[in-house]
Structures are given as structure tokens and as C-alpha cells.
Image (cartoon, grey):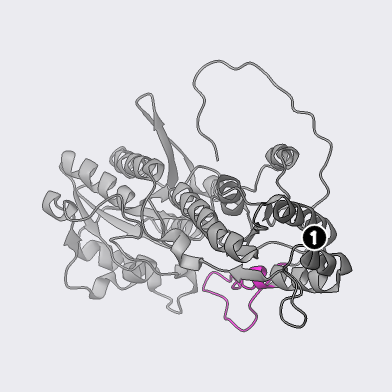
Amino acid sequence: MKNIGIITGGGDGGGLNAVIKGAAQMANRKGVKTYVIPNGYAGLYNLVEMDSLVELTPSRLDVFSINLAGSEAGHSRVKISKINDAKKYDRIKEGLKKFKIDGLIISGGDDTGSVMLDLDKQGIKCVHAPKTMDLDLIPYSVGGDSAIERLAAFIRDIKTTGRTHNRIIVLETFGRYVGHNAFHGGVAGECDAILIPEIPVDFDELYRHLKKVYTKRIIESDINAGTYTIVVSEGFKDAAGEAMHDDSAKADSFGHKKLAGAGKYVAKILEERLEKDPEIKQFMKEQGMFVEGLYEMPEVRAIVPSHLVRSGFTSSYDANFGIEAGAGAVYLLLDGIHNVTVTGYQNGIFSYMDIAEAIARRSVDLEKVELYEQIGFCFGRVRKDFTAKHKKVKGKIDRIY
């Protein structure tokens, strides 16, 4: 194997440039050339028509930073099996042959990984460096820690305006059908309530908690100032188990409907309850906040930072993991191992698993949720009785999200 192509696909996020740079630097060390195949799987399909590819020489690598989020390779959301071309795989092989590319390192999430399974069946050697800010893959993936850091910072920042105006803030974030981002980012940002897809929301309980915490803060403040913050994952479910979809938007090539409106939906439900609650009006009067016809209840604001959560800078953890995953992908390809996902590097050993296993969905640990409920976080349900177990452990403990 003398030439390796590098592809990044799906959504962008922190750590991708670390994967690219780690892979290219290790390949250079081993006397192997690496090339960027731009624009994800769209670029792979159109490779045969390209005149040239960017080689990741030491000089080229020197001009981009592993600390930046996004990808120097570019992205697209294309499911190759859905391309209306009976000879699509022959076309891809022809493009790889044109540039003498012997194997691919591909960084992406479950959708990207599912396409790799098809490529491997066609005899195209691939190794997967896991990436998803949603953290829904079985192994840790670059992008997750960076997104959580960004989300936590947004939550902390928005509290200043929330407290200034005595507002209730509902902040919607990515996650699709798992709530890792909302859970860990919400805890780190010290949200009051965290709504995730794994737990259908009981709005009676959410409102009870909001009313109790919000009014207490303002009453106990010497300047009558307080706020209440909620982070909601885009794929959260109401009591009926329904997620909020944007039916006006087309599904992507992987068949995913666009998830949208979770934050607005939660804000609307809370506004309706606040408006009908006579105790809230009395509270507003007692705190000197009430103005007939103009300001009769607290404002509820829905905020969607959207792609800002996955932009900007890579966390230190993702920078480290990304370099290791990229370097490990090179080692595996050179050893003749493919159709696998790099899962980490410890004690001089690169670990990996089959891609099909790696892209299985991993949900939030609900036993861990119970711990945070005891501490005071609201997850939109009645808090359960909780008794933690404990045990003594030996040896090295891995960091687990």
C-alpha cells in the first residue's frame, strides 16, 4: 500500500482535522503518500473526473491546525447505494485506480460507516475513524467532546441575559435520537432541566419544577433577579412518544427526516401554562414585575445555536483522540486490516472493532440520569427513588461518555 485517500463525511465537528493530520503524518513517516478526496462520498463518486488531488505533504499539513473544527477535506451527505447509476461502484474503482489509491481512511458517523460496509463488499479497502458530535456510536468518536464544551459555554453565557430579564430560556441542540450532547452539556452548563429523547417528557412535572425553582430564585434575590434554563435535544419526545419533525423539509439521502422545532414546542407549552396560572400573576405582582396588558408573566425564549455547536474549535480531548484514530487507521491498512473502526490506542496497542458493530446506536445511560436527578436536575419526569451501588476497582479506568 503506497497511496491512501482520506475522506470525511456526514456532519462536521471538532477533531476531524486531527484525524486527517494524524493519518497523514503517520503515513509520511511510513513512506506512504496520502491524498485528500474532497467533498465526502460525492467526491469519491466523481473522483474519476478530477484532474488532480491534494497530497498531504509535510508542508501542506503545516498550514492547517488540529485545533480548528470543520474539515480540510470537505463534506457531503451522499448515500452511494442510492446513486442512480448501475455502474457507480465501477466508476469509484476507476477513480481510485486513476490516482493509484490502494485504500481509504474515512471519518464519519453511522451513516458514513454504513456506506463503508457497501464499499468493502465491492473490494474497496477502508478503515473507519469514528466521528459524531451526537456520540451515538458504540466507541467514543471525535466531535462529541468539542460539541459538549461549546454547548456548555452557550448555556453559561445565555444565563446572563436570562437573569437580566428574568427570562426562562429553552436552548435546543443537536443529537438526533440520543441525548448525549444535551445531557453532558446541560450538566456542565448547570441547566435546570434537560430533555432528551430517551425520556418522554411529562410537562406537568417539568412545569412544577420550573415554577418552584424559578420563583424561589427571584424571591430570594435582593434585586428580584433570576432565570431558569432548559436544554432540549432536537429529537426529544413528548408523552405520546412523538419527536418533532419538519414535515416541510425533504428527507436526506439516508432517509432521515429533519428534526426541528423542539425548542419552540417546549417554549409554547410552558407559555400556555404560565399564562393560565393565577399563582404566577400573583407572584409577578408581589415581586413588582407585573404590568397589566404588557408584562403579566415571565418571558420564555427559545434559542437554537444550531451549527455554532459544531463549529469553532476542537477540544483538547478530541485533538488527542483524532490524532490517535488517524494514525491507527494507517497502521491497520498497512497491516492488511480493513472494514473496521479504530476505537483507541493504549499500552502500545491500536484497538478496533467491526464497522457494523461500531455504528450500532448507543443511548444515554438512564442509571446515570438517575444520579443527576438526585442532585437536582430535572429530566421532565417524576424523580425516582435512588440507591447507588459501589465497588472497588483495580487497574486503569478509561474515560467514558
Residue at image x 74%, y 77%? 291
Give the percent coordinates (x, y) of residue 79: 47, 69
Marks counted in the figure total 1
Residue 187 painted magenta: no
**Highlighted magenta segment, given as a residue range:** 243-264
Horizontally, residue 127 falls left or right of residue 307, namely: left
Give the percent coordinates (x, y) of residue 169: 63, 63
Horizontally, residue 204 falls left or right of residue 390, namely: right
- Residue at the outermost right position: 278
Horizontally, residue 75 falls left or right of residue 198, namely: left
Q: Quadrant of the C terminus?
A: top right
Residue at image x 36%, y 65%? 40
Residue at image mark 1? 207
In-front residue for pair 317/269: 269
Give the percent coordinates (x, y) of residue 144: 48, 50
In-front residue for pair 71/220: 220
Q: Amino acid at mark 1?
A: Tyr
Above or below, comparing residue 331 to residue 84 in the picture: above
Residue 91 falls in which quadrant of the image?
Answer: bottom left
Residue 119 falls in which quadrant of the image?
Answer: bottom left
In-front residue for pair 165/7: 165
| Prevailing SS of the magenta stretch | loop
Residue at image x 80%, y 52%? 381
Residue at image x 26%, y 67%? 95
Residue 247 falls in which quadrant of the image?
Answer: bottom right
Report whether residue 129 is seen: yes
Above or below, comparing residue 145 to residue 310 in the picture: above
Give the percent coordinates (x, y) of residue 29: 17, 39
Above or below, comparing residue 10 to residue 271 in the picture: above
Mark 1 lies on a secondary structure that is helix
Report whether residue 379 is seen: no
